[in-house]
Image: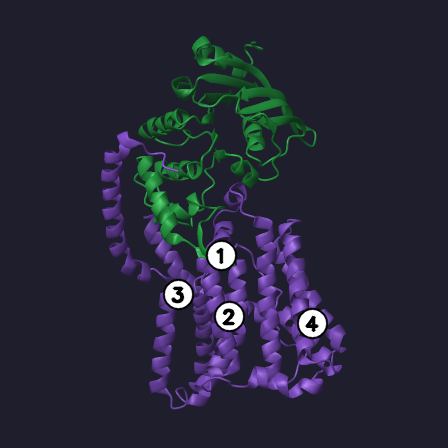
Chain colours: A purple, B green
Amino acid sequence: MARSLGAHAFQERSIMAVTLDQTIAQKQHTFLSRLFSNQTFWVVIAVILACLFLSFATDSFATSKNIFNITRNVTFVAIIALGMTFVIITGGIDLSVGSVLCLCSMILAVTMHAGYSIEIGILASIATALAVGAFNGVLIAYLGFPPFVVTLGVLSVARSLAMVASNNTVVFQFGPDHQKLLSLGGGAWLFGIANPVLYMIVLALITGFTLRWTKFGRHIFAIGGNEHAATLTGVPVKQIKVAVYMISALSAGLAGIIQTGWLGAVTTNLGTGMELQVIAATVIGGANLAGGVGTALGAIVGAALIEVIRNSLGLLGINAFWQGTFIGGAIILAVLFDRIRNFRRSD
Amino acid sequence: MPVLELANISKHFGAIQAVNDVSFSLEAGEVVGLMGDNGAGKSTLVKMIAGNFHPSHGTMRLDGSELVLHKPADARQHGIEIVHQDLALCNNLTAAANVYLGRELRRGFGPFRILDYGAMYKRAGQLFAELKSETRPRDLVKQMSGGQRQAVAIARTMLSQAKIVLMDEPTAAISVRQVAEVLNLIRHLRDQGIAVVLISHRMPDVFDVADRVIVMRRGRKVADKKIASSSPEEVTGLITGAIEQVA
């Protein structure tokens, strides 16, 4: 490996010493500035400030019941946002997640209602999610379809299939394992933390680990940064693209299973419009729709900020019609910060 | 024996004949300038050697045995490295991540293997030092100058013991001082016994560093001469078609 030969050794060492010093200086210089230029950091600050403000401004915010409610409401959007983060980092988008959530919930419900065990129901549901994700991914990666179009089509197809599967009825009896399903989604097995929150934390840790520490994660960022370069350097771009859409659909399926257990009933309008909340959460959390940027923490805090805004409007007695304005404002504000940072950098 | 031998290589994309019946061989420790106008088929030829394209006809031999490449990783495995014209860098990744793109180092065992950031930063830093580049392994490529980006792309070819390095216009978009650096690097590679193919539009660079020049026009090879027995005027004539062909 050592191409450097004796003659260069001294010179090289001095150069390396310089670069080492520079590197260290650079590191000290950038730790704080990197933190301050991090969108996720500011969203975390915003969430904390909002929570502090609400705890003082209202009597009902900092109650354990309300906190329990918020954390639980955050989770369904947050879990899908974790999956969506993979897709968005590659520069893609998945509009089908809301419908996939509904379809997977319905498959689970119908299977269990027909008398099968919870294991078979979950297996069928996950298989459905993976199949839908693979369909999205293959069309996008191998046939070159624009992600927006494919997943828009599947948004329509998946919801319609959910209606077909259930004959557009509400399913609320889940056969012999009814109780198991309800406790899976509605229980609080650890320290009184709602189960969905536990699942979210576990999935967030897996996502964060995958993005930072695996070759797969590294390649996802490479594809989002420069897909052509990734192809030229031998990154298996197509397979990875299929995988990210499968992950996204899987996250929607898991959220669907958990939500079914939580709600105890499935209707065919479950998850309607959820894709937009999910995308909003990832973008607020710092992911870039152009690709190449995104974190697991960002997806979670983005979802949290949306939920805190929604919750606070109710508690502060502001008309619910204003909700959309505030959430939309948060999206634009989050991206505005990003734009301002870029302007400053290019100056 | 030549390191690489191309025999009657052709490549067409639909009705377009990009490379037409090209043969040449490459010796170890030799720098060959590959010249030609835009669309003459230089990049297509090089991409076939790099495993990006399949030849439509013809065979390639590496060290005497037939070479069939299905993907860029195959070429690398055989010791063929390429520096792409657009450098193929990801702006959102660090210099070290770009150097190791597609062949990341990992530690741990079995399925439980994680990226080895430390080893990649260290080795990338050594390579940049060897290239006498001021590039820092942890910096994002987005913040780098043209020369630093070039160093990142070239450092990639030095990760493994390459036999052949293909360089697609390495001096096209950099400063005069950096051109001299790149030419020095090419000599550095040559002295290691590596065969270098230098695609370039810049006549002075080719005549400065190459041992041999191959000229292509409209997909065909029209000249294959020692630099010593050619001249910039002759090569210009061959590129433009003012001179039809030389033996």
Chain-order first, disc 1 or disc 2: 2
Disc number lying in front (3 or 2):
2
Could you tell me which secondary element the residue under label 4 belongs to? helix
Q: Which residue is mark 2?
A: A203
> Looking at this rendering, what residue extends furthest in the front direction?
B109
User: Can residue B123 be seen by looking at this rendering?
Assistant: yes
CA distance for labels 3 and 2: 18 Å
Badge 2 amino acid: Leu
Badge 3 amino acid: Thr
Badge 1 amino acid: Gly
User: Can residue B18 be seen by looking at this rendering?
Assistant: no
How crowded pointer 1 is (Cα within 10 Å; few <14, some 14-19, many 20+) is rated as some
Chain-order first, disc 3 or disc 4: 3
Q: How far from the left and from the top, in percent, is residue A319? A: 48, 83
Q: Hey, which quadrant is residue B187 in on the image?
A: top left
- How many numbered discs sit on the rendered protein? 4
Badge 4 amino acid: Ala
CA distance for labels 3 and 4: 36 Å
Chain-order first, disc 3 or disc 2: 3
Chain-order first, disc 1 or disc 3: 3
Q: Is residue A341 above or below residue A233?
A: below
Disc number lying in front (1 or 3):
1
Q: Which residue is mark 4?
A: A124
Chain-order first, disc 1 or disc 4: 4
For the point 38% across and 61% down, which residue is it? A337
